[in-house]
Every structure is written in C-alpha cells, then in structure tokens.
Image (spheres, rainbow, N blue to C red):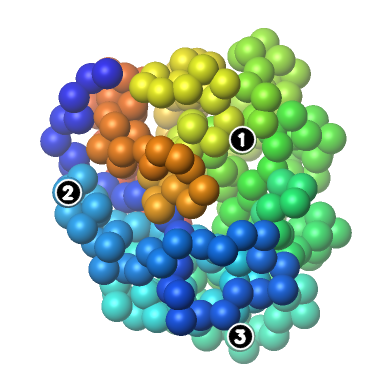
Amino acid sequence: MTTTTATPALACDCHIHLYDASLALAPTATFKPPHAPLTDYRRVQAALGLDRVILVQPTGYGFDNRGLLDALAQLGDSARGIATVPEDVSDAELQRLHAAGVRGVRFMMIAGAGGVLPWSALEGMAARIAPLGWCINLQLDGRDLPRHLNVLKRLPGKLVIDHTGKFLEPVPVTDPAFKALLSLLDKPRRWIKLAAPYETSKLGPPHYADVAVLAKALLDAHSDRCVWASNWPHPNRHPVPRDAELLALLTDWVAEEAVRERVLVTNPASAFGF
C-alpha cells in the first residue's frame, strides 16, 4: 500500500460516529457501542492532518441528538452534523439544528441496523430540508439501488450515499446496480462517500480489492462527486482497522494530487456546506 502523502489544508473526514457511555441507548439500538468520545477522535484527526469532520448521528441513539449537538458546539465551524429527526419534526427544530451546525438527515436502510426512518418518509423529508441546503444522508445495500433509482434521482436538494454504495456483496462494475449508482451521480447535487471498505469486502485488507475496483471506477467517472471518510471508531470490527491505512487507500485509488484534494476538500465543502 502506498504511504499516505501530506493531507491538504481543510481536508475533511466525512463520516464518523461519537459514542458517550453516559447517554442512554434507544430501544431500537442493535448493539452496545464502545465509549468513543470526541477527545479520542481529535487525536486521530490530528494524526491524519484532517481539519474538518462530519459527525453522523449513531443509530443507537435514535432521535436523541444531544451528543451530536454537544460535539458540534465544541468543534465550531470545523464540523457539520448529520442528525436523525422524526417525520413530524417542527420547522423550529430544523432551524435550531441548522444553527447548531447540522446539515443533513440520516436514513439508515440496511435491514436490522437500527434505522428509525422509513422509506416512506424520504421524499417528504428531502422536500423540507432542501431549502436549508441540507442533504439526505442515505445508507442502503447498493444492490437495491435499481429499485429506488427513480425516487433518488428526483429528490430535491442534496443526496449523499454512504460507503462506496455499500454493496453487501461486492459487484463488478458492469453490474446493473453499480451502473445505477453511476447514473445517480450524473444528477446534480449527488455525492458518494469512499469509506468503510472493510464492511463489505470479501477479499479483506490491506487492499480490499473487490471494493477498491468500485472506488476507482467512481473516481474515474465522478471525481467531483466523491468524498472520503474514515468511519471511525469502526464499532464491531475486530481487529479495528488502522485509520492511517484507510486514508492511504485513497492514494492507491487515485494518483493525481489535484483529484485527492478535490475529494478531501472541495467536494465536502459543497456537499456539507462549509
């Protein structure tokens, strides 16, 4: 694996979770997370040379965004948040969250993963948050993309897809589901996170070759729509992936420094409103 090169100024880690043992888990939680506070992540952030971060509400806390908001208050303008809100959330609450640094709503659609918002809420929520400049942050099994493609293409506002499409069985680039992802990224205001290859790869570290081929294809076709993320703290992964090695994968996937800067700096600023 290529050694990580210098990280550009204002580089952004576009997907991490924070866990606080003092916060109660929601009834929908599917596992007990590790204690992974902001102070621990800040050490990782400093070691990797990352100036910005996107905090994603863990499924385990359901609609309780207190931990997310506390961390955003500590981080100030160097962070943005992805919250989880109920379908009937008030306009006043959306405005409060916006002022706190929230810039998106999370939809976790992997079966059994503890998501609390249904597919039926997607279009209505997207319409409500589009005027705020927020995104729908969507995680699904990429093999299901063809079934939802028309809806996802017509959503107003921004859409960010997690984890290289999160094909739970990695597919070839010729697969209709991967082609659906490429066609979705043809639309304006659509982005894809290059993240967490260890969650779906059948070939494993250090190169995660079956996911790497998808990441490279996405970069070749849509480098202006790709962002990178560590997915720290990698709950339930044993052994825990090394964050520096995950960042180094980006250098393996794309050689051009200007493209890496686009992925780490320019694209996140557009997607998450820095």
Q: Nearer the viewer, residue 220 or 119?
A: 119
Label 1, on which residue? Answer: 166
Query: Circle 3 sits in a helix, a strand or a loop, which is it?
Result: helix
Query: Circle 2 sits in a helix, a strand or a loop, which is it?
Result: helix
Cα distance between the residues tagged 3 and 1: 31 Å
* Vertical position of residue 77 compared to residue 11: above or below: below
* 35 displayed left or right of 261: right
Mark sitting earlier along the chain (2/1): 2
Cα distance between the residues tagged 2 and 1: 27 Å
Q: How many marks?
A: 3
Q: Residues within 10 Å of mark 3 (few under 14, many from 20)?
A: few
Which part of the image, by quadrant, shows the N terminus? top left
Mark 3 or 1: in front is 1
Which residue type does callout 1 highlight?
Answer: Lys
Name the residue: 81% across, 55% down: 119
Which residue type does callout 2 highlight?
Answer: Ala
Q: Is label 2 in contact with label 1 (beta carbons under 8 Å)?
A: no
* 191 displayed left or right of 101: right
